[in-house]
Amino acid sequence: MADGAVLHRRILGVDYGSERVGLSLSDPLGIIASPIEALKNDQSLMNNIQQLSVREQVNLIVVGMPFNLKGEHAQKAQEVQEFIDTLKSEVGIEVAVWDERFTTTMAHQTMRTMGTKKKERQKKDGRIDSMAAAIILQGFLDHTKHSLSC
């Protein structure tokens, strides 16, 4: 790599759910997170994440970890940790964990602010899941940016 060259990377954000897994993707500079899709949580999930990661040149995956109000692992944390362990072994990309408290609530609020009708927000099509994944990833990106600029 030439002197002064900047390493651009994409980061995949994940909001794990028992039925659907919301996904978001950063821009190549790691500044903005955008919701992309929600995948069905079934046998093809890891393969689909692997294909997406290769196609989008992802070199880091940020997974939302459920914490309770006291900052302790919430009830679903064990299931998320098992997902992370499988992700690390099957996809082979570095995984970071990020606090996902209130992200689904914030996703609903964001969609309301965008003018999305209640009927549309209540659809089980994964929009809320991918929006929550974007909120998780944006929090991580903002924190990382501030940490690097100090």
Image (cartoon, rainbow, N blue to C red):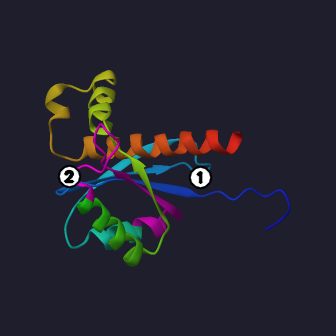
Secondary structure beneath disc 2? loop
Quarter of the N terminus within the rendering: bottom right
Q: Name the amino acid, label 2.
A: Gln
CA separation in Å, label 1 and label 2:
34 Å
Q: Amino acid at mark 1?
A: Pro
Q: Position of residue 78 (x, y in %)?
A: 25, 61
Rendering quarter of residue 127: top left
Question: Is 58 colored magenta in this rendering?
Answer: yes
Q: Is residue 27 above or below residue 10?
A: above
Q: Measuring 65% from the left and 57% from the top, which residue is drawn there?
A: 8
Residue at 41% across, 65% down: 52
* Segment colored magenta: 52-77
Residue drawn at point x = 37 percent, y = 77 percent: 90
Q: Which residue is mark 1?
A: 28
Q: Which secondary structure, mark 1?
A: loop
Expressed as whole percent of the image width and height from the top left, the position of residue 63 reads: 39, 55
Residue 49 sits inside the magenta stretch: no
* Number of marks drawn: 2
